[in-house]
Amino acid sequence: MEPSKSLRTATTRVVGVVSVVVVLVLLSANGAESRKQWVFDYFEYSAINCRAHSASLTDFGGVGDGITSNTKAFQAAIDHMSQFASDGGSQLFVPPGRWLTGSFNLTSHFTLYLHKDAVLLASQDENEWPVIDPLPSYGRGRDTQGGRYISLIFGTNLTDVVITGDNGTIDGQGALWWTKFHKGELKYTRPYLIEILYSYNVQISNLTLLDSPSWNVHPVYSSNVLIQGLTITAPVTSPNTDGINPDSCTNTRIEDCYIVSGDDCIAVKSGWDEYGIAFGMPTKQLVIRRLTCISPFSATIALGSEMSGGIQDVRAEDILAINTESGVRIKTAVGRGGYVKDIYVRSMTMKTMKWAFWMTGNYGSHADNNYDPNALPVIQGINYRDMVAENVTMAARLEGISGYPFTGICISNVTIGLAKKAKKVPWTCTDIAGISSGVVPQPCDLLLDQGPEKIVACNFPTDSLPIDTVEVQSCSYWGKYL
């Protein structure tokens, strides 16, 4: 089965998806219309690389009726198309329909594209979710000791992989998993929707993700990761449905995403306790832009709590948080080790919040009892500036570790409007050190006010990171399916 050749262009402009569908009615020998109709589809999309070969899932026996399992069809298609990795790469088109599937593995130099009316439905059959080893930087699963169910869309040791579409949908059908979690019936840790490990040049864009069993998007041990235009939703009471979790990754860009979550909208991670310390791979050079978050019980952007490999050089701007527990939260504990430093956040708007800022050095939640009580995290160089918040219960709760304070905190040009039933003391600060300038209400004494004569702007880097120079191309597809 030879996939058709794609049309290819080399422009670098960002284009919207254009789709033109032509239906050709095949005539039978006596002139009557056939019952089957070929659909010819053309579309354009933006990607880090275009592909020379294309095919549709239906070419490999896919059935989009919402009932038939397509796990074998997906894997057969990807296995077949992997042969084109050194010949211009390949793209697999998922046409309109409801495509029930278990987990499947991606390949290099490959694009998975979902039509706007395509829905991937995660299988409810646990037999379609193989169990894999825990991540080495975690030492165990997040829900249980031992292994974990593989993610719905999974890839490891890949180069140049794209998961995109015209806002096609991936529905994790997570309610079954949430119930098992609450009842303590899980044998292994719940699967994620998308997980990419040990990979380089990754794009995940223009998709709608619904009701993940647990985390939604998890790039881990990877570099040059571009995440754009995702809509991620789950009930705000669903357990651990984090939106996007960059984990031990270098050069990651997250932008133009809308997230409604039962946990942190974005959680930056790098391993857990002694396992993360031993693995020693930090998350660094991370850009977050134009994010909208709704998460009443968690953070807009969380750093940790699994941060034992270190987190450094995070740049977030143009963030909108609505009805969310906290704007920026740093979570760590004795035994974590590692560091969180050189964090820069600006141009953030917060509406109806419990806290604008939250730091805690006593988060707890250890992988096991073998953590090192002398492994103390370093938290320093935290910069927040140019923010407005309204209807906030408490401006900040900043709690370091006794004898090992969080240092180098800077907050400037921040106005926090308190709610009618706000706490009487808007700031609580222990074991921290830093400065403030132009902040309302007046911060705690541990954030030394620089006064009106010495207005200070907290740092925000002016240089560009390598991920900022990554450009997308205008790619296209022309193919047919029944």
Image (cartoon, grey):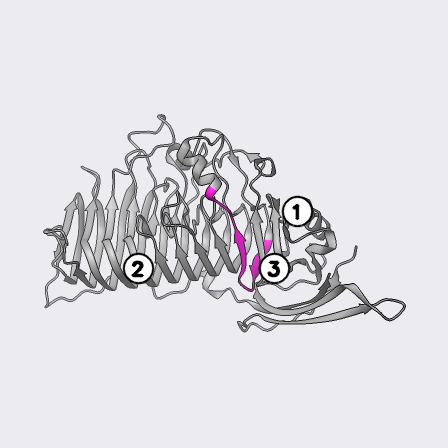
Q: Earlier in the sequence, mark 3 or mark 1?
A: 1
Query: Is 380 one of the magenta-colored residues?
Result: no
Residue type indicated by callout 3? Tyr
Q: Is residue 142 visible?
A: no
Q: Is residue 125 left or right of residue 302?
A: right
Q: Is residue 223 above or below residue 454?
A: above
- Residue type indicated by callout 1: Thr
Mark 3, residue position: 113
Q: Nearer the viewer, mark 2 or mark 3?
A: 2
Which is closer to the viewer, label 2 or label 1? 1
Please state which amino acid type lies under the numbered disc 2.
Ile
Residue drawn at x 75%, y 59% is: 3
Residue drawn where x is 34% and y is 40% of the image? 338
Q: Are marks 3 and 1 in contact (CB under 8 Å)?
A: no
Residue range (magenta): 160-175
Dot 1: what SS?
strand
Residue placed under numbered mark 2 in the picture:
322
Q: Quadrant of residue 252?
A: bottom left
Task: Count neighbours of disc 2 (C-alpha within 10 A) and say few if under 14, some if 14 to 19, many if 20 or more.
Answer: many
- Viewer can see residue 304: yes
Which residue is outermost to the right?
30
Q: Does the magenta run of residues contain 161?
A: yes
Which of marks 3 and 2 precedes in the sequence? 3
| Numbered disc 3: secondary structure | strand
Question: In which quadrant of the rendered view does residue 370 lie?
Answer: top left
Q: Which mark is residue 95?
A: none
The residue indicated by pointer 1 is: 68
Task: Using the image, determine if residue 20 lies above or below residue 268.
Answer: below
**How far apart in space, not on screen, are marks 2 and 3 (Cα)?**
31 Å
Give the camera-side residue of 34 and 463. Answer: 34
